[in-house]
Image (cartoon, rainbow, N blue to C red):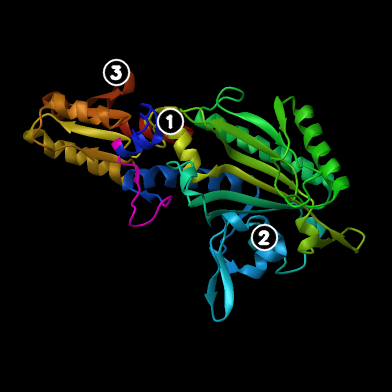
Amino acid sequence: MTEPVEHSRDHKRLGRELELFTFSDTVGKGLPLWLPKGATVRRELERFIVDEEIRRGYLHVRTPDIAKLDLYKKSGHYPHYKDSMYAPIVIDDEEFMLRPMTCPHHFELYLSKPHSYRELPMRIAELAQLYRYEQSGELMGLQRVRTFCLADAHIICASEEQAVEEIGKALDLIEYVTSIFGLVLDKDYRYRLSLGDRANTEKYYNDNAAWEKGEGLLRDLMISRGSKFEEAKDEAAFYGPKIDIQMKNVNGKEDTAFTVQYDFCMPSRFNLVYTGEDGAEHQAFVVHRSSIGAIERIMAFLIEKYEGAFPLWLAPVQLQILPVSEKHIGYATELFDTLKTAGIRVEIDSSNETLGKKVRNAKQEKVPYLLVIGDKEVDSTALTLEGRGEEKVPLTTETLLPFLKEKITTRT
């Protein structure tokens, strides 16, 4: 059987060509290995979303990648997600699981002490490494893997009204994030209201009244926001309906990139309660959400969106310095040291190649900016920064760093 021809923008192809990530059959199928350049891009994504979430009132935490099987039985994920979970690991006569999700971990964290209504909503967030068994035939580059890092959060709310408000704020965050990435609603992504199936009591938590109310709350919210969305039956989580953000890859395959979920099941399972203004104990409400989804999956979409030519703030190498000849290397190295110390991701090509070959190599690597250093640059403070698309920016040694810093900081 002949292998399918990869699209020129396919993230698997670009990942190899740009040395972003690789896979090894010796390590295992569906387990990506991040090369330095790819690790740089994902690190920038992680820093961006953590900083933005903290700015919006999220409390970032760390919880273990493994837990006792009893935790997932308590949450109901086992046996609902048994087929996509790795086999139990027996330690000291107890069964443990590599975690496929973080919600039960965060609920146990919430339960570590009593809470008042004054503390709610409590937004518990984590960049969490998760493990799910995907069928071999379903694995596909970074979009379908067996371990991934999810920008996850669980929001404990005091009322249904507060939960709906938090869902709206989560959608605001998602729309802000997508705008930074240059993704356009109803062009690059779309909303889907994912509903349950009352007849499928094996797959879904059996509470028809709660399903009707939860689906109605999400539907009304989307209508009030003026958002276009389609409804999809039998696509909900087992514990409640959700709003999914759907994206297609270059080959037309659609996946859920981000999601916001309303949960009417877990609060009772975990006895998630708070002390109300009346001094009595009340049951909380829960919102699950992922802001940029799995880092692996959004990386796949962004590689294809940008065709590997990342914007300056995300680019693994932001500037490449090209000395014309050996006699220019000393001055080029001085500039390199200054920029490197200031946090710019800069490289210097001090090879014996011709200038034309150096320029071609940098462009093949899709570096945002090139800086040629020759006699004119050594003899004066004048510099000419060449950007993608043949953009030329006249600068000086004093204005080079502020120019780059401003573009990186504003993510333009």
Whichever of callouts 3 and 1 sits on the residue coming sooner in the sequence is 1
Magenta-colored span:
17-31
* Residue 209 vertical placement versus 284 (above, below): above
Q: Position of residue 35 (x, y in %)?
A: 33, 48
Residue of label 3:
390
Q: Residues within 10 Å of mark 3 (few under 14, many from 20)?
A: few
Task: Give the quadrant of residue 312.
Answer: top left
First reached walking from the N terminus: tag 3 or tag 2: 2
Residue wearing tag 1: 304
What quarter of the picture does the N terminus occupy? top left
Q: Amino acid at mark 3?
A: Glu
Task: Name the disc covering residue 79, or none.
Answer: 2
Residue 61 lies left or right of residue 158; in this view the side is left
Rendered residue at 48%/32% (across/down):
410
**Residue ranking furthest to the front:** 1
| Residue 274 sits in quarter | bottom right
Q: Secondary structure at mark 2?
A: helix
Q: Secondary structure at mark 3?
A: helix
Eye-nearest disc, 3 or 2: 2
Q: Position of residue 2 (x, y in %)?
A: 33, 33
